[in-house]
Image: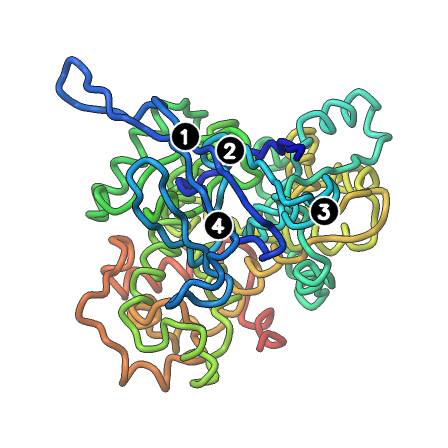
Amino acid sequence: MSTDILPIPRCSSTSGFICVSDQINELTCISTNTKRRKKKSGSSKSKVKATNLLQVDKNSFKRPGTSGGELVYKNRTNKQITKANTLPSLYKKSFKFHYGGGLSPAEQLSILPPPLELRRVPLLEAIKPMNQIAEKIKFMRSKHRYNPQLVYTNPPSPESLARFEYPAQKYLQLAVKIMEMTLQKFGTYEKFEEVTAGRLVNRTQILTAVTKYLRDENLESEVAICLSDDILCRACMTRCKGKPTINVRITNLREQWLDGLLRHEIGTHYLRSANNRCQSWRSMKARKEMELHPCNPTEEGLASLHSVILRKEPSLWRAAVLYYTTYQAAHMSFKDLFSDLGQWMSDENVRWDYCMRAKRGQRDTSQPGAFCKDQVYLTGALEILKNRYSIDFHMLTRCGKVSYKDLPRLKDIADLENTRLPFFMSDDSLYKKRLDYIVKQNGLSDEDFLDIN
Protein backbone atom coordinates (compact mmCIF):
# COMPACT_ATOMS: atom_id res chain seq x y z
CA MET A 1 0.00 0.00 0.00
CA SER A 2 1.50 3.32 -1.11
CA THR A 3 1.63 6.35 1.13
CA ASP A 4 1.64 10.01 0.08
CA ILE A 5 3.17 12.73 2.23
CA LEU A 6 1.39 16.08 2.46
CA PRO A 7 3.28 19.02 4.02
CA ILE A 8 1.24 21.19 6.31
CA PRO A 9 2.10 24.94 6.61
CA ARG A 10 3.14 26.59 9.84
CA CYS A 11 0.69 28.30 12.12
CA SER A 12 0.44 29.70 15.64
CA SER A 13 -1.10 26.85 17.58
CA THR A 14 0.61 24.33 19.80
CA SER A 15 -1.70 21.45 18.92
CA GLY A 16 -1.41 18.82 16.24
CA PHE A 17 -4.87 17.25 16.12
CA ILE A 18 -7.24 17.26 13.16
CA CYS A 19 -10.73 15.80 12.86
CA VAL A 20 -11.19 13.74 9.70
CA SER A 21 -13.97 11.58 8.29
CA ASP A 22 -14.38 7.89 9.01
CA GLN A 23 -13.42 7.07 5.42
CA ILE A 24 -9.83 6.98 6.58
CA ASN A 25 -8.63 3.61 7.73
CA GLU A 26 -5.59 4.83 9.53
CA LEU A 27 -3.86 8.12 10.17
CA THR A 28 -0.37 8.32 11.55
CA CYS A 29 0.76 11.74 12.65
CA ILE A 30 4.41 12.49 13.22
CA SER A 31 4.52 15.47 15.55
CA THR A 32 7.33 17.28 17.15
CA ASN A 33 7.80 16.98 20.85
CA THR A 34 9.65 19.51 22.95
CA LYS A 35 12.18 19.05 25.70
CA ARG A 36 13.27 21.76 28.07
CA ARG A 37 16.89 22.75 27.92
CA LYS A 38 18.26 24.72 30.84
CA LYS A 39 20.32 27.85 30.33
CA LYS A 40 23.26 28.94 32.46
CA SER A 41 21.00 31.38 34.26
CA GLY A 42 18.83 28.53 35.43
CA SER A 43 15.90 29.42 33.12
CA SER A 44 14.68 26.98 30.52
CA LYS A 45 13.38 27.29 26.98
CA SER A 46 11.47 24.87 24.81
CA LYS A 47 13.48 23.34 21.98
CA VAL A 48 12.54 20.78 19.37
CA LYS A 49 14.15 17.58 20.58
CA ALA A 50 12.41 14.37 19.56
CA THR A 51 9.42 12.95 17.78
CA ASN A 52 6.53 11.03 19.21
CA LEU A 53 4.19 8.80 17.24
CA LEU A 54 0.44 9.20 17.60
CA GLN A 55 -2.02 6.82 16.03
CA VAL A 56 -5.75 7.03 15.46
CA ASP A 57 -7.66 3.87 14.77
CA LYS A 58 -10.59 3.73 12.34
CA ASN A 59 -12.79 2.55 15.22
CA SER A 60 -12.16 5.74 17.17
CA PHE A 61 -15.49 7.06 15.99
CA LYS A 62 -17.27 4.12 17.60
CA ARG A 63 -15.69 4.22 21.04
CA PRO A 64 -18.24 4.39 23.89
CA GLY A 65 -18.54 7.83 25.40
CA THR A 66 -17.18 9.71 22.41
CA SER A 67 -19.32 12.25 20.59
CA GLY A 68 -19.74 12.50 16.84
CA GLY A 69 -16.60 13.67 15.12
CA GLU A 70 -14.47 13.14 18.22
CA LEU A 71 -11.19 11.31 17.76
CA VAL A 72 -9.32 9.36 20.41
CA TYR A 73 -5.56 9.37 19.96
CA LYS A 74 -3.43 6.57 21.34
CA ASN A 75 0.14 7.38 22.23
CA ARG A 76 2.28 4.45 21.20
CA THR A 77 5.00 5.32 23.68
CA ASN A 78 3.13 5.45 26.97
CA LYS A 79 -0.31 4.06 25.92
CA GLN A 80 -2.11 7.18 27.12
CA ILE A 81 -5.42 8.13 25.52
CA THR A 82 -5.92 11.72 24.33
CA LYS A 83 -9.17 13.22 23.06
CA ALA A 84 -9.50 15.83 20.32
CA ASN A 85 -12.96 17.39 20.56
CA THR A 86 -12.37 20.44 18.44
CA LEU A 87 -10.27 21.61 15.54
CA PRO A 88 -7.54 23.80 16.98
CA SER A 89 -5.00 25.32 14.62
CA LEU A 90 -2.68 22.53 13.57
CA TYR A 91 0.27 24.28 12.07
CA LYS A 92 2.53 25.36 14.96
CA LYS A 93 5.23 22.78 14.23
CA SER A 94 6.02 20.95 11.00
CA PHE A 95 3.66 18.02 10.60
CA LYS A 96 3.49 15.34 7.95
CA PHE A 97 0.33 13.29 7.53
CA HIS A 98 0.53 9.82 6.01
CA TYR A 99 -2.75 8.57 4.60
CA GLY A 100 -3.47 4.92 3.95
CA GLY A 101 -6.61 2.93 3.33
CA GLY A 102 -6.46 2.94 -0.45
CA LEU A 103 -7.41 6.63 -0.88
CA SER A 104 -6.03 8.37 -3.94
CA PRO A 105 -3.96 11.58 -3.51
CA ALA A 106 -6.92 13.65 -4.73
CA GLU A 107 -9.23 12.02 -2.17
CA GLN A 108 -6.67 12.57 0.56
CA LEU A 109 -6.46 16.27 -0.31
CA SER A 110 -10.24 16.59 -0.41
CA ILE A 111 -10.63 15.73 3.27
CA LEU A 112 -8.44 18.67 4.31
CA PRO A 113 -9.89 22.15 3.79
CA PRO A 114 -7.45 24.77 2.48
CA PRO A 115 -5.32 26.14 5.35
CA LEU A 116 -6.66 29.67 4.90
CA GLU A 117 -10.21 28.48 5.52
CA LEU A 118 -9.19 27.23 8.96
CA ARG A 119 -8.26 30.72 10.12
CA ARG A 120 -10.82 33.40 10.89
CA VAL A 121 -9.18 36.77 10.39
CA PRO A 122 -10.51 40.12 11.69
CA LEU A 123 -11.70 42.35 8.86
CA LEU A 124 -9.12 45.09 9.40
CA GLU A 125 -6.36 42.48 9.17
CA ALA A 126 -7.93 40.78 6.15
CA ILE A 127 -7.99 44.00 4.10
CA LYS A 128 -4.31 44.71 4.66
CA PRO A 129 -2.56 44.14 1.28
CA MET A 130 0.49 41.90 1.40
CA ASN A 131 2.12 43.65 -1.59
CA GLN A 132 1.58 47.31 -0.72
CA ILE A 133 5.29 48.14 -0.61
CA ALA A 134 5.96 46.66 -4.05
CA GLU A 135 2.89 48.36 -5.48
CA LYS A 136 3.91 51.69 -3.99
CA ILE A 137 7.28 51.44 -5.77
CA LYS A 138 5.52 50.68 -9.06
CA PHE A 139 3.11 53.56 -8.55
CA MET A 140 5.81 56.11 -7.80
CA ARG A 141 8.00 54.95 -10.69
CA SER A 142 5.06 55.31 -13.08
CA LYS A 143 4.77 59.00 -12.18
CA HIS A 144 1.40 58.27 -10.55
CA ARG A 145 -0.15 56.82 -13.75
CA TYR A 146 -0.50 53.24 -12.47
CA ASN A 147 -3.41 51.79 -10.48
CA PRO A 148 -2.11 49.32 -7.85
CA GLN A 149 -3.23 45.70 -8.06
CA LEU A 150 -3.57 44.54 -4.46
CA VAL A 151 -3.14 41.00 -3.14
CA TYR A 152 -4.37 39.74 0.22
CA THR A 153 -3.14 36.85 2.34
CA ASN A 154 -6.62 36.23 3.75
CA PRO A 155 -9.05 37.97 1.35
CA PRO A 156 -12.16 39.39 3.04
CA SER A 157 -15.53 38.01 2.01
CA PRO A 158 -17.79 40.17 -0.19
CA GLU A 159 -20.40 40.09 2.57
CA SER A 160 -18.05 41.62 5.15
CA LEU A 161 -16.99 44.38 2.75
CA ALA A 162 -20.56 45.14 1.73
CA ARG A 163 -21.24 46.75 5.13
CA PHE A 164 -18.73 49.50 4.32
CA GLU A 165 -19.34 49.79 0.57
CA TYR A 166 -21.41 52.96 0.25
CA PRO A 167 -20.04 56.31 1.46
CA ALA A 168 -22.13 59.07 2.99
CA GLN A 169 -22.27 62.60 1.62
CA LYS A 170 -24.11 64.24 4.51
CA TYR A 171 -21.09 65.93 6.14
CA LEU A 172 -18.97 66.40 3.01
CA GLN A 173 -19.39 70.18 3.05
CA LEU A 174 -18.34 70.37 6.69
CA ALA A 175 -15.32 68.19 5.95
CA VAL A 176 -14.28 70.56 3.16
CA LYS A 177 -14.92 73.55 5.45
CA ILE A 178 -12.56 72.13 8.11
CA MET A 179 -9.88 71.42 5.49
CA GLU A 180 -10.19 74.91 4.00
CA MET A 181 -10.01 76.48 7.47
CA THR A 182 -6.79 74.61 8.17
CA LEU A 183 -5.14 75.68 4.91
CA GLN A 184 -6.36 79.24 5.42
CA LYS A 185 -4.55 79.39 8.79
CA PHE A 186 -1.33 77.60 7.79
CA GLY A 187 -1.07 78.04 4.02
CA THR A 188 -0.16 74.42 3.21
CA TYR A 189 -0.61 71.02 4.80
CA GLU A 190 3.15 70.70 5.11
CA LYS A 191 3.29 73.92 7.14
CA PHE A 192 0.38 72.73 9.28
CA GLU A 193 2.26 69.50 9.94
CA GLU A 194 5.46 71.34 10.79
CA VAL A 195 3.76 73.67 13.29
CA THR A 196 1.32 71.29 14.97
CA ALA A 197 2.80 67.79 14.73
CA GLY A 198 6.11 68.40 16.47
CA ARG A 199 9.44 66.76 15.73
CA LEU A 200 9.92 63.29 14.30
CA VAL A 201 10.48 60.62 16.96
CA ASN A 202 12.54 57.45 16.69
CA ARG A 203 11.87 53.96 18.02
CA THR A 204 13.48 54.58 21.41
CA GLN A 205 11.55 57.81 21.93
CA ILE A 206 8.30 56.11 20.92
CA LEU A 207 8.85 53.28 23.38
CA THR A 208 9.66 55.75 26.16
CA ALA A 209 6.54 57.84 25.46
CA VAL A 210 4.21 54.84 25.30
CA THR A 211 5.64 53.39 28.51
CA LYS A 212 5.21 56.74 30.28
CA TYR A 213 1.60 57.06 29.13
CA LEU A 214 0.77 53.56 30.35
CA ARG A 215 2.41 54.37 33.67
CA ASP A 216 0.37 57.60 33.98
CA GLU A 217 -2.84 55.65 33.39
CA ASN A 218 -1.68 52.85 35.75
CA LEU A 219 -1.88 50.35 32.88
CA GLU A 220 1.77 49.36 32.61
CA SER A 221 1.10 45.76 33.66
CA GLU A 222 -2.11 45.42 31.62
CA VAL A 223 -1.11 46.53 28.13
CA ALA A 224 1.79 45.24 26.04
CA ILE A 225 3.65 47.34 23.44
CA CYS A 226 4.40 46.36 19.83
CA LEU A 227 6.34 48.71 17.54
CA SER A 228 5.97 47.99 13.82
CA ASP A 229 6.59 49.59 10.43
CA ASP A 230 4.05 47.69 8.31
CA ILE A 231 0.61 48.63 9.64
CA LEU A 232 -1.65 50.89 7.57
CA CYS A 233 -2.81 53.06 10.47
CA ARG A 234 -0.61 54.94 12.91
CA ALA A 235 -1.69 52.78 15.84
CA CYS A 236 -4.27 50.20 16.85
CA MET A 237 -5.25 48.03 19.81
CA THR A 238 -5.20 44.24 19.39
CA ARG A 239 -4.84 41.18 21.60
CA CYS A 240 -1.64 39.12 21.46
CA LYS A 241 -1.73 35.79 23.32
CA GLY A 242 -4.73 37.06 25.22
CA LYS A 243 -3.08 40.31 26.38
CA PRO A 244 -4.19 43.76 25.17
CA THR A 245 -1.46 45.22 22.95
CA ILE A 246 -0.91 48.72 21.62
CA ASN A 247 0.59 48.53 18.11
CA VAL A 248 2.39 51.68 16.95
CA ARG A 249 3.76 52.39 13.48
CA ILE A 250 7.25 53.80 13.88
CA THR A 251 7.65 55.38 10.42
CA ASN A 252 7.02 59.12 9.96
CA LEU A 253 5.61 59.56 13.47
CA ARG A 254 5.74 62.93 15.18
CA GLU A 255 5.65 63.91 18.82
CA GLN A 256 2.17 65.46 19.01
CA TRP A 257 0.69 62.70 16.86
CA LEU A 258 2.10 60.14 19.26
CA ASP A 259 0.47 61.78 22.27
CA GLY A 260 -2.82 62.00 20.40
CA LEU A 261 -2.86 58.40 19.23
CA LEU A 262 -2.18 57.19 22.79
CA ARG A 263 -5.22 59.12 24.03
CA HIS A 264 -7.13 57.72 21.06
CA GLU A 265 -6.21 54.05 21.40
CA ILE A 266 -5.55 53.62 25.13
CA GLY A 267 -7.35 56.53 26.80
CA THR A 268 -10.49 55.92 24.75
CA HIS A 269 -10.71 52.50 23.07
CA TYR A 270 -8.97 50.40 25.70
CA LEU A 271 -10.48 52.01 28.80
CA ARG A 272 -14.00 52.01 27.35
CA SER A 273 -13.52 48.36 26.39
CA ALA A 274 -12.32 47.51 29.92
CA ASN A 275 -15.26 49.40 31.43
CA ASN A 276 -17.62 47.60 29.08
CA ARG A 277 -16.63 44.25 30.60
CA CYS A 278 -18.04 45.43 33.91
CA GLN A 279 -21.52 45.97 32.47
CA SER A 280 -24.48 43.66 31.99
CA TRP A 281 -24.64 44.56 28.27
CA ARG A 282 -21.09 43.38 27.57
CA SER A 283 -22.22 40.53 25.29
CA MET A 284 -23.71 40.95 21.82
CA LYS A 285 -26.72 38.90 22.91
CA ALA A 286 -27.44 41.30 25.78
CA ARG A 287 -27.00 44.33 23.50
CA LYS A 288 -29.54 42.91 21.06
CA GLU A 289 -32.01 42.11 23.83
CA MET A 290 -31.69 45.67 25.16
CA GLU A 291 -31.86 47.09 21.61
CA LEU A 292 -28.79 49.26 22.08
CA HIS A 293 -27.45 51.46 19.30
CA PRO A 294 -24.12 50.47 17.69
CA CYS A 295 -21.17 51.94 19.59
CA ASN A 296 -20.03 53.69 16.41
CA PRO A 297 -19.91 56.48 15.41
CA THR A 298 -19.77 57.54 19.08
CA GLU A 299 -16.71 55.37 19.82
CA GLU A 300 -14.51 56.65 17.00
CA GLY A 301 -15.86 60.19 17.24
CA LEU A 302 -14.90 60.39 20.91
CA ALA A 303 -11.47 58.93 20.13
CA SER A 304 -10.94 61.49 17.35
CA LEU A 305 -11.72 64.37 19.71
CA HIS A 306 -9.37 62.94 22.33
CA SER A 307 -6.58 62.80 19.72
CA VAL A 308 -6.54 66.60 19.50
CA ILE A 309 -8.09 67.73 22.78
CA LEU A 310 -4.81 68.77 24.45
CA ARG A 311 -3.24 70.41 21.38
CA LYS A 312 -2.79 74.12 20.95
CA GLU A 313 -4.20 73.76 17.43
CA PRO A 314 -6.84 71.01 17.78
CA SER A 315 -7.65 70.71 14.09
CA LEU A 316 -9.95 67.91 12.94
CA TRP A 317 -8.01 67.85 9.67
CA ARG A 318 -7.34 64.12 9.64
CA ALA A 319 -10.95 63.13 10.37
CA ALA A 320 -12.12 65.55 7.66
CA VAL A 321 -9.62 64.28 5.07
CA LEU A 322 -10.58 60.66 5.79
CA TYR A 323 -14.25 61.51 5.26
CA TYR A 324 -13.51 63.40 2.04
CA THR A 325 -11.08 60.79 0.68
CA THR A 326 -13.48 57.92 1.32
CA TYR A 327 -16.27 59.68 -0.56
CA GLN A 328 -14.04 60.51 -3.52
CA ALA A 329 -12.56 56.98 -3.64
CA ALA A 330 -16.03 55.53 -4.20
CA HIS A 331 -16.19 57.48 -7.46
CA MET A 332 -12.55 57.44 -8.60
CA SER A 333 -9.68 55.15 -9.44
CA PHE A 334 -6.59 55.10 -7.21
CA LYS A 335 -4.49 57.32 -9.49
CA ASP A 336 -7.34 59.83 -9.94
CA LEU A 337 -7.87 59.97 -6.19
CA PHE A 338 -4.15 60.51 -5.66
CA SER A 339 -4.26 63.41 -8.14
CA ASP A 340 -7.37 64.90 -6.51
CA LEU A 341 -5.72 64.97 -3.09
CA GLY A 342 -2.94 67.07 -4.61
CA GLN A 343 -5.10 70.16 -4.18
CA TRP A 344 -4.94 69.65 -0.41
CA MET A 345 -1.42 68.31 0.16
CA SER A 346 1.70 67.83 -1.95
CA ASP A 347 3.52 65.19 0.11
CA GLU A 348 3.41 62.00 -1.99
CA ASN A 349 3.80 59.64 0.97
CA VAL A 350 0.92 61.25 2.86
CA ARG A 351 -1.33 61.10 -0.19
CA TRP A 352 -0.41 57.45 -0.73
CA ASP A 353 -1.38 56.59 2.85
CA TYR A 354 -4.80 58.25 2.52
CA CYS A 355 -5.48 56.59 -0.83
CA MET A 356 -4.42 53.17 0.42
CA ARG A 357 -6.69 53.44 3.46
CA ALA A 358 -9.65 54.33 1.23
CA LYS A 359 -8.92 51.63 -1.38
CA ARG A 360 -8.00 48.76 0.95
CA GLY A 361 -10.12 45.69 0.37
CA GLN A 362 -10.10 46.21 -3.41
CA ARG A 363 -7.99 44.12 -5.77
CA ASP A 364 -8.15 46.25 -8.92
CA THR A 365 -7.94 49.88 -7.78
CA SER A 366 -8.59 51.20 -11.28
CA GLN A 367 -12.27 50.70 -10.44
CA PRO A 368 -14.30 53.10 -8.29
CA GLY A 369 -14.86 51.79 -4.79
CA ALA A 370 -13.95 52.47 -1.19
CA PHE A 371 -13.76 51.00 2.29
CA CYS A 372 -16.03 53.52 3.97
CA LYS A 373 -15.48 52.80 7.67
CA ASP A 374 -13.17 55.81 8.00
CA GLN A 375 -16.13 58.18 7.72
CA VAL A 376 -17.15 57.36 11.30
CA TYR A 377 -14.37 59.57 12.74
CA LEU A 378 -15.80 62.87 11.53
CA THR A 379 -19.42 61.74 11.82
CA GLY A 380 -18.99 60.77 15.45
CA ALA A 381 -16.97 63.87 16.33
CA LEU A 382 -19.60 66.22 14.88
CA GLU A 383 -22.46 64.42 16.66
CA ILE A 384 -20.66 64.64 19.99
CA LEU A 385 -19.74 68.30 19.52
CA LYS A 386 -23.34 69.18 18.75
CA ASN A 387 -24.54 67.47 21.95
CA ARG A 388 -21.55 68.37 24.13
CA TYR A 389 -23.63 70.28 26.70
CA SER A 390 -26.13 67.47 27.26
CA ILE A 391 -23.77 64.46 27.33
CA ASP A 392 -22.45 63.16 30.65
CA PHE A 393 -18.93 62.32 29.43
CA HIS A 394 -17.87 60.59 32.63
CA MET A 395 -20.87 58.29 32.38
CA LEU A 396 -20.29 57.80 28.65
CA THR A 397 -16.79 56.48 29.37
CA ARG A 398 -17.68 54.41 32.43
CA CYS A 399 -20.59 52.68 30.67
CA GLY A 400 -18.21 51.18 28.13
CA LYS A 401 -18.73 50.81 24.41
CA VAL A 402 -22.14 52.44 24.11
CA SER A 403 -23.63 55.27 22.08
CA TYR A 404 -24.35 58.57 23.79
CA LYS A 405 -27.97 58.05 22.67
CA ASP A 406 -28.35 55.13 25.09
CA LEU A 407 -27.01 56.93 28.18
CA PRO A 408 -30.40 58.09 29.56
CA ARG A 409 -31.59 54.50 30.04
CA LEU A 410 -28.25 52.94 31.00
CA LYS A 411 -26.92 55.36 33.60
CA ASP A 412 -29.20 54.05 36.38
CA ILE A 413 -28.31 50.39 35.84
CA ALA A 414 -24.58 50.77 35.11
CA ASP A 415 -22.05 49.12 37.41
CA LEU A 416 -19.47 51.84 38.05
CA GLU A 417 -17.50 50.22 40.87
CA ASN A 418 -14.44 49.03 38.93
CA THR A 419 -14.62 51.43 35.99
CA ARG A 420 -11.89 53.96 35.17
CA LEU A 421 -11.46 57.35 33.49
CA PRO A 422 -8.44 58.60 31.54
CA PHE A 423 -6.50 61.35 33.30
CA PHE A 424 -7.46 64.06 30.78
CA MET A 425 -11.17 63.60 31.61
CA SER A 426 -10.86 63.99 35.37
CA ASP A 427 -12.03 67.65 35.34
CA ASP A 428 -15.38 67.63 33.53
CA SER A 429 -15.68 71.42 33.37
CA LEU A 430 -12.23 71.83 31.82
CA TYR A 431 -12.95 68.95 29.46
CA LYS A 432 -16.05 70.69 28.03
CA LYS A 433 -14.16 73.97 27.66
CA ARG A 434 -11.64 72.12 25.53
CA LEU A 435 -14.46 70.82 23.35
CA ASP A 436 -15.66 74.41 22.88
CA TYR A 437 -12.14 75.32 21.83
CA ILE A 438 -12.12 72.52 19.23
CA VAL A 439 -15.35 73.90 17.72
CA LYS A 440 -13.91 77.40 17.51
CA GLN A 441 -10.51 76.44 16.08
CA ASN A 442 -12.11 74.40 13.29
CA GLY A 443 -14.29 77.29 12.13
CA LEU A 444 -17.51 75.59 13.18
CA SER A 445 -20.59 77.15 14.74
CA ASP A 446 -23.92 76.03 16.15
CA GLU A 447 -25.49 76.77 12.75
CA ASP A 448 -23.28 74.07 11.23
CA PHE A 449 -24.75 71.53 13.66
CA LEU A 450 -28.41 72.13 12.76
CA ASP A 451 -28.54 69.28 10.23
CA ILE A 452 -26.69 66.83 12.49
CA ASN A 453 -28.89 64.20 14.14
Give the side of residue 109 with respect to residue 75, left or right: right
Residue receiving disc 1:
32
Residue receiving disc 3:
107
Q: Amino acid at mark 2?
A: Phe
Q: Distance of mark 3 from mark 2, alpha carbons?
A: 19 Å
Q: Position of residue 311 (x, y in %)?
A: 40, 45
Element assignment for label 2: strand
Observer-nearest of 433 and 136: 136
Residue 77 can be seen in this image: yes
Q: Nearer the viewer, mark 4 or mark 3?
A: 4
Residue 184 can be seen in this image: no
Q: Amino acid at mark 4?
A: Asp
Sequence-first disc among 2 and 4: 4
Residue receiving disc 4:
57
Q: Residue at x 65, y 55 (%)?
A: 323
User: Does the residue at mark 3 contact the one at mark 1 (Cβ under 8 Å)?
Assistant: no
Give the side of residue 221 with respect to residue 174, left or right: left
Tell me if residue 213 comes above or below residue 200 in the rendering. Answer: below
Tell me if residue 171 comes above or below residue 341 in the rendering. Answer: below
Instruction: For label 2, count other residues whose C-alpha is less than 10 Å away and answer few (under 14), some (14-19) or many (20+).
Output: some
